Image (cartoon, grey):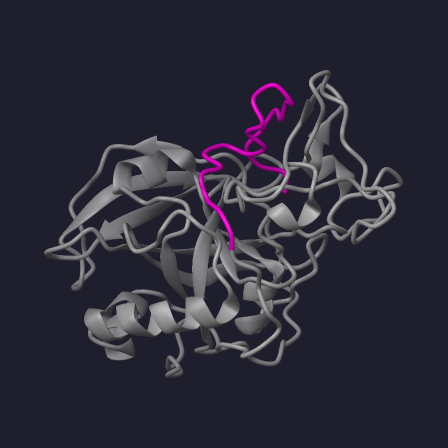
Amino acid sequence: MGKQVIRITLLSLLLCPLALAQTVEAPGSPQPVYLEPVDNTLQSKAATPVMLDGRENSCSTADSVLLDMVVRDHDGHHPHQVPVWQVPDGQIFFFVSGMTIDADGAPNAYSPDDGGLDELANAGSPARWEGIVTDRDGNPLIQQAGDPFPGYYISCTSLVDKAKSFTDPTRYVDATKIPYVVLPHGLADRAGARLGDFAIVTNLRNGKSSFAIYADIGTLGEGSITLADALGIRSDARRGGAADGILYLLFPGSGNLRPRALDEIQIEGEKLLSDFGGMKNLYPCAENDDSASPIESF
């Protein structure tokens, strides 16, 4: 994940920040809006963003800039501002950014021999791990016989199924099964977004869209492997992603602080999209992005 550092302890039993949710297995069907993946060689790794003062807006659908974020590349260079807009008469907010691929929550995300879906370096270091469950001494816990991937570390997300043990890899939102987005804590707090809230994410380069759930805390412009697949973005957590052109629309207060199955994300997302006025209301947001192409309907 390579983002916000999270210390996990047996004492607290809080395996990722704000782990407030419970229940719901994710069945393999029905599949929501996932589309066939398309090869995309654009790559990006966002660093920790910094909030700046809000400014006058220029987006026709936005009432005001909620805040500006400064995002740097994976080397800490080339900072660029990403305005976060709030739509009129509501808490709904959106922004256009790139997408870094997040493997967190997948039982095969990280391994001691660095053979997991993502580079072990992106999980932190022995002094300060993130996205990995540790014991009270900070030692990563390893999956045992009977777990999905024995020998791999237990990777966590901020959104969890509290009905399950913190040592159960299925307690967390699996990046390879569920389309989820990641938000910085400061942005979520400012916007009133809670873990478990819903989102609509659109690839402005090819018009593909997907419903998603806010399931992890990190940096601006991150999405799960499954979300990337649905958007036609290269979903390799090590080498995939998109540098720009991804529209994120969030619905604060729309969730119930719990993980959701695929069909629930689809059903709830369709309701929110209908209340929002349909896909046509995304066009004014996309028109300001040079990479925009016609947006596909669900």
Does residue 73 appear in the picture of this structure?
yes
State the extent of the magenta-drawn residues as a range: 1-23
Query: Quick check: 223 above or below 110?
Result: below
Q: How many numbered tags mark residues here?
A: 0
From the viewer's perspective, is 236 left or right of 34?
Answer: right
Q: In which quarter of the image is the N terminus?
A: top right
Query: Quick check: 279 above or below 260?
Result: below
Query: Quick check: 66 above or below 59?
Result: above
Residue 256 drawn at (x, y percent): 36, 51
Q: Of residues 286 and 256, which is closer to you in this image?
A: 256
Residue 222, magenta (yes or no): no
Does residue 104 appear in the picture of this structure?
no
Residue 195 drawn at (x, y percent): 41, 45
From the viewer's perspective, is 43 left or right of 55?
Answer: right
Q: Of residues 87 and 75, which is closer to you in this image?
A: 87
From the viewer's perspective, is 76 left or right of 276?
Answer: right
- Which secondary structure class fits the magenta region best? loop
Residue 276 drawn at (x, y percent): 21, 69
Name the residue at 64% across, 32% down: 130
Name the residue at 21% across, 46% down: 65
Residue 17, magenta (yes or no): yes
Q: Of residues 69 and 268, which is closer to you in this image?
A: 268
Name the residue at 72% across, 23% down: 135
Q: Quadrant of residue 157?
A: top right
Name the residue at 24% across, 55% down: 92
Q: Quadrant of residue 198?
A: bottom left
Residue found at the very far front of the displayed protein: 163
Q: Of residues 203 and 210, which is closer to you in this image?
A: 210
Residue 173 drawn at (x, y percent): 58, 52
